[in-house]
Amino acid sequence: MQIIFRDRAFSFELLRTLGTVYYGGADIGECLSTAYRVKEGDFESWYTEWHRTADRVCKYGDECLSLGHKVSARQAYLRASGYYRVAEFFLRENPEDSRIVKTWEDSVNSFNEAAKLFPHHFEFIEVPYEGTTIPGYIYSPSVNIDRSSATKGSSRNTSRPTLIVTTGFDGTQEELYSQCVVAALQRGYNCITFEGPGQGRVIRKQGIPFRYDWEKVVTTVIDYVLNSSHKNKEIAEVSPNRIALMGLSFGGYLAARAAAFEDRLSACILNDGLFDFHEVFVRQYRNTHLEPIMTGTNADLVNIAVLATMGLNPRARWAFSHGMWVFGIATPFELLQKIC
């Protein structure tokens, strides 16, 4: 399915953004009017037009807040956060481009402004991880729980099932709010999101690339949640026997890997299940001259062929540029070997 753009990458990212409309992450009119201004296949035009929309909607949020219209302000800030994320998406050819961090920060800051106005509990967390920390958010549909009534033997149950959500190859945890969190809260779940190596802040500010053994990441999140969830009186306790993990996109591989080693998970959702990430790259060029080259072992030939394709194909240009950045490697050949 394609919309507005002939370029498959641009069309997909527009559809991805439209998919958040249901839970307030975007507005159909704002998305379509922005997309029609974007020049086909032009990364700079994409950035300029989505950033312009994000700035306008964020300013509208400021105006609403100043007038005391908190619901409208919250909705505007949430949409602005998503539009800043979309604007930054294709800035990958130069990982040192200062707009990457600045626009990502604008997305996070807009989200945090929206979070101040959420009708449910929200808390930012820093999860200890191998000498540093990784960022996360905890959401709970219950606030101001009276734990004094939850004495031993009491019939009152203050614990809740908890959904942990991991994003994938190119997502941020702010995006997960409209994709997963709101639906989970409406169904009575606590929800926890986080960014691990190769994702969000962890790659942009901390420079830590992806790792394949995602159980090392998920285990630290579960440890943190079970050891500290009781400390905040506004958050319903995490039921230790009712923890589910959901992975989106490449997160479908990451979550499956974590679930294979983390026995405290009672359920795992793979949306979608990703069996072979290398295949995702190669199948884009099936039945073309590139397929045998990309699956070969001649590094120079692979690099020459892929770089030439990146110059002609915006989707390939983004995918390989982003992949080399988030996996911390320098050439297309190294990326293809890394993800085998």
Image (spheres, grey):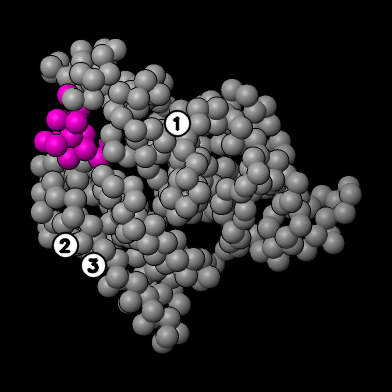
Decide: is 160 above or below 242: below
Query: Residue at left 47%, top 35%?
Result: 210
Residue 271 seen: no
- The numbered mark at residue 52 is 3
Decide: is 220 above or below 234: above
Magenta residue check for 307:
yes
| Tag 1 secondary structure | helix
Query: Residue at left 62%, top 47%?
Result: 132
Q: Quadrant of residue 2?
A: top left
Residue 37 seen: yes
How packed mark 1 is, by other alpha carbons closer than 10 Å (few <14, some 14-19, many 20 or more), is many
Residue 110 x, y percent position in the rendering: 42, 67
- The numbered mark at residue 252 is 1
Query: Residue at left 40%, top 24%?
Result: 338
- The numbered mark at residue 33 is 2
Q: Nearer the viewer, residue 100 or 147?
A: 100
Q: Earlier in the sequence, mark 3 or mark 1?
A: 3
Decide: is 61 above or below 3: below
Residue type of the residue flagged with mark 2: Ser
| Tag 2 secondary structure | helix
Residue 101 x, y percent position in the rendering: 39, 57
Q: Earlier in the sequence, mark 3 or mark 2?
A: 2
Residue 52 lies left or right of residue 312; in this view the side is right
Residue 280 lies left or right of residue 204; in this view the side is left
Q: Which residues are magenta?
A: 305-319
Residue 340 x, y percent position in the rendering: 39, 19
- Quadrant including the N terminus: top left
Task: Farthest residue to the front: give it.
Answer: 300
Residue type of the residue flagged with mark 1: Gly
